[in-house]
Image (cartoon, rainbow, N blue to C red):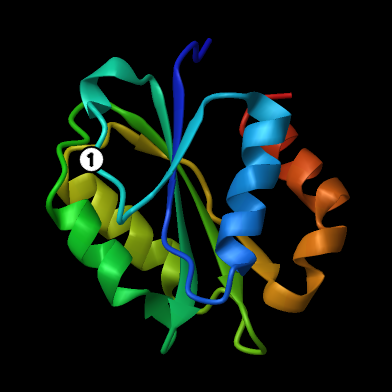
């Protein structure tokens, strides 16, 4: 269904990067940090966007990144790492940002507690199955 996948993430502590790498290992595709040169989003069918939870919402650098890209007609699969706060408003805010950038569909966000990233394989597999990728 989705042939070309892109995983874009912002990671301060390394947890979101680890989760991005786990997603890449599970579904393939290309993975880039938001500090890398922007890829050609038109070349991808499915875009994974990863952010840590910052003050109950999408991290500012990731929010700014999304505002600067064109997601017209794309399907987006958001993922989030967090501390004790959980998902909070990240999922809803990520959906709003992606929709404003033109995304046609935004899957539910998967939240993973930062200290649990290394053990998140089953949760990740369940999410990928839920969104139709496994």
Q: Quadrant of residue 110?
A: bottom right
Left or right position of 51 against 43: right
Residue at the image position 70 percent from the left and 74 percent from the top: 113
Q: Looking at the image, which is closer to me, 84 or 107?
A: 84
Q: Is residue 84 above or below residue 25?
A: below
The quadrant of the image that shows the C terminus is top right
Q: Looking at the image, which is closer to me, 45 or 16?
A: 16
- The residue that label 1 is drawn on is 38
Q: Looking at the image, which is closer to me, 122 or 96?
A: 122
Left or right position of 103 against 6: left
Residue at the image position 26 percent from the left and 37 percent from the top: 103
Left or right position of 75 against 80: left
Residue at the image position 39 percent from the left and 77 percent from the top: 57
x%, y% of residue 62? 31, 63
x%, y% of residue 24? 62, 35
Q: Quadrant of residue 69?
A: top left
Categorize mark 1 by other alpha carbons within 10 Å: few (<14), some (14-19), many (20+): few
Residue at the image position 48 percent from the left and 66 percent from the top: 11
**Helix, strand or loop under label 1:** loop
Q: Is residue 41 above or below residue 85?
A: above
């Amino acid at each position: 269904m989705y042939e070309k996948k892109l995983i874009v993430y912002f990671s301060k502590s390394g947890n979101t990067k680890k989760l991005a790498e786990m997603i890449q290992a599970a579904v393939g595709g290309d993975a880039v940090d938001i500090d890398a040169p922007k890829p050609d989003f038109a070349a991808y069918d499915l875009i994974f966007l990863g952010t840590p939870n910052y003050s109950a919402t999408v991290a500012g650098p990731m929010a700014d990144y999304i505002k600067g890209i064109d997601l017209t007609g794309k399907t987006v699969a958001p993922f989030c790492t967090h501390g004790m706060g959980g998902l909070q408003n990240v999922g809803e805010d990520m959906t709003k940002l992606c929709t404003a950038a033109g995304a046609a569909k935004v899957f539910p966000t998967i939240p993973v507690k930062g200290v649990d990233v290394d053990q998140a394989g089953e949760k990740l597999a369940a999410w990928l199955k839920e969104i139709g990728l496994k």
